[in-house]
Image (cartoon, helix red, strand yellow):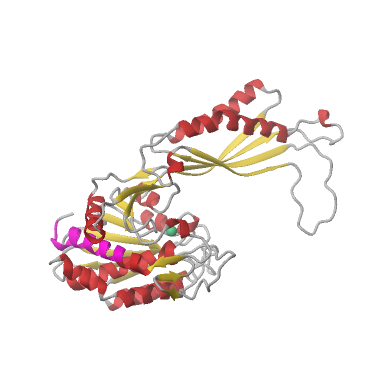
Amino acid sequence: MPHSAILAAVDTRRQDLIGLAQDLIRIPTLNPPGQKYREICDYLAARFMAQGFTVEMIRAEGTPGDSDAYPRWNMVARFNNGPGGCVHFNSHHDVVEVGHGWTRDPFAGTLEGDRLYGRGACDMKGGMAASIIAAEAFMAACPGWRGTIEISATADEETGGYGGVAHLAELGYFDPARVQHVIIPEPLHKDRICLGHRGVWWAEIETQGRIAHGSMPFLGDSAIRHMGTVLAEIEERLYPLLASRRTAMPVVPEGARSSTLNINSIHGGEPEQDAGFTGLPAPCVADRCRIIIDRRFLIEEDLAAVKAEMIAVLERLRASRPGFAYEIRDLFEVRPVMTERDAPVVRSTAAAIERVLSRVADYVVSPGTYDQKHIDRIGRLKNCIAYGPGQLHLAHQPDEWVGVQDMMDSAKVMALVLEDLLAGGAAP
Ligand SMILES: [Zn+2]
C-alpha cells in the first residue's frame, strides 16, 4: 500500500477531525473534581463500537478522587485484525480548570482560521482526535493490516494519573505481552518525539522549636529561625551544586537540563486567619515551621542520593546549631524515564515525521512528568513516547488552542507509524 493512499485517507477526514476535536472540547471534563468522565467515555465508545472495536469501560474505584459523584471512568477500545503487534494510543481525557483571562468560551470549540480554541484543545483533546483519525484512516486505506490497534482515554493525568493510566497498568493493560508500542499524543509539537521525563521528589521538611511569649523570645526557640538556616544552606550550597549538574537528556526548555529545586510553600507559627478576621495576631515564638520542596532530578542521578543530599544539609545543621531539630517526610516520587532512541516506536515515528514534514525529528525530554511513568514503572513497557500536535506552552493557559494543520500533520505521522508497525503483519 503506497503511503499516498494513507495520507489521502487522512486528508479526506479533515472536517471529521475538526468536528471530533470540537465534540471532545464541548464535554467539560474538568479535573478537579473530575466531572463528565463517563460522558466523554460514552461518546468515544459509541464511535469505536460503530467501527467494530471492542470497548471496555473501567472505573478506577477506590483511587484518589473516585466517588459516586465523581467516578473515575476510563475507556479502552481494541481492534484485532489477526496476529501481529499491538500499537496503543493513550490520551488523558481530563482538563485543568479554566482560570481567568479567556476571551472565548472555553467549552465552545470555536474555530477561527486554523486555530481551534478551548480548554483542553492543546492538552490534549486535539492529540486524542488526531490519533483516532490516524487509526481510522489507516484501517480504511490499508485493509490488509495485521495486529491490534488500541486507543484509550484515561482519567486524572493532570492530578497524577492514579485513577487513569496507573490503574490500567495495575490491571495489566500495559503488559508488554499485550501491548508493544505506546504513543501518548501530548502536545509536544508535530516534529518532536518526547522520549521521557525527569524524576520528581516532593518532601515536607519541618523544623521544631519551643513556644514562648514573643516579648521574651529568649525563653523559647524559634522554628522559623532554624528554617532560615535551612534556606540559607539550600541557597548557598545546594543551588550552585544542582545548577552545575548537567544531563545528557535532551530536556526542553534548556534551563531544565540541570537538577532543579523549587520551594513550593513555607509556613511557620500561628496559622493564617480567614480573610474576614479583623483581630491582631498573638505574640508567640513559632514552635513549628514547614516547607514543601519539589526536587526534579536527572536520569544520571539516583533517588536515594538525591534524598541523602538534602538530609546531609539538615544533619550538618543539627551538628552545628544548638537546638536544631527537624523531621522530613516523603510526599511523592517518580523516577526519570527515557526510551532509547533506537526503540521501534521511536524509529518509526522519526521516519514518519521526515516523510510527512520533510524535516528531521527533534528528540526531547519533558521537564515534568506525565503518564509515561506508570507505563514504564507499573507496566514495565519501555517502548513508549509522547508525540502529538500542539505547543506545550499553550497548555493550561487562557485561550488555549490547537492548530488544525498541526492536528492533520500529526495524524498523518501517526497513520504512517501504524503502517510501518502493522501493515506487514510483522511479529511483535
Ligand atoms: Zn496533558
Of all residues, the one furthest to the right in this rendering is: 215
Q: Position of residue 162 (x, y in %)?
A: 46, 55
Asked whether, in this view, residue 312 is left or right of residue 51, the answer is: right
The answer, for residue 58, to whether it is visible in the render is no
In the image, residue 401 sits, relative to residue 364, either above or below, namely below
The residue closer to the viewer here, 341 or 103, is: 103
In the image, residue 71 sits, relative to residue 334, either above or below, namely below
Q: Position of residue 292 (x, y in %)?
A: 59, 43
Q: Quadrant of residue 168?
A: bottom left
Secondary structure character of the magenta stretch overall: helix
Asked whether, in this view, residue 316 is left or right of residue 157, the answer is: right
Q: Position of residue 100 (x, y in %)?
A: 59, 65
- The residue sitting at 76% across, 56% down in the picture is 274
Q: Tell me the quadrant of the picture where the C terminus can be found.
A: bottom left
- The residue sitting at 74% across, 36% down in the picture is 287
Asked whether, in this view, residue 339 is left or right of residue 80, the answer is: right
The residue closer to the viewer here, 223 or 386, is: 386
Of all residues, the one furthest to the top in this rendering is: 320
Q: Tell me the quadrant of the picture where the N terminus can be found.
A: bottom left
- The residue sitting at 63% across, 25% down in the picture is 317
- The residue sitting at 34% across, 44% down in the picture is 338
In the image, residue 262 sits, relative to residue 192, either above or below, namely above
Q: Quadrant of residue 233?
A: top right
- Magenta stretch encompasses residue 423: yes
The answer, for residue 405, to whether it is visible in the render is yes
Residue stretch rendered in magenta on the structure: 409-426
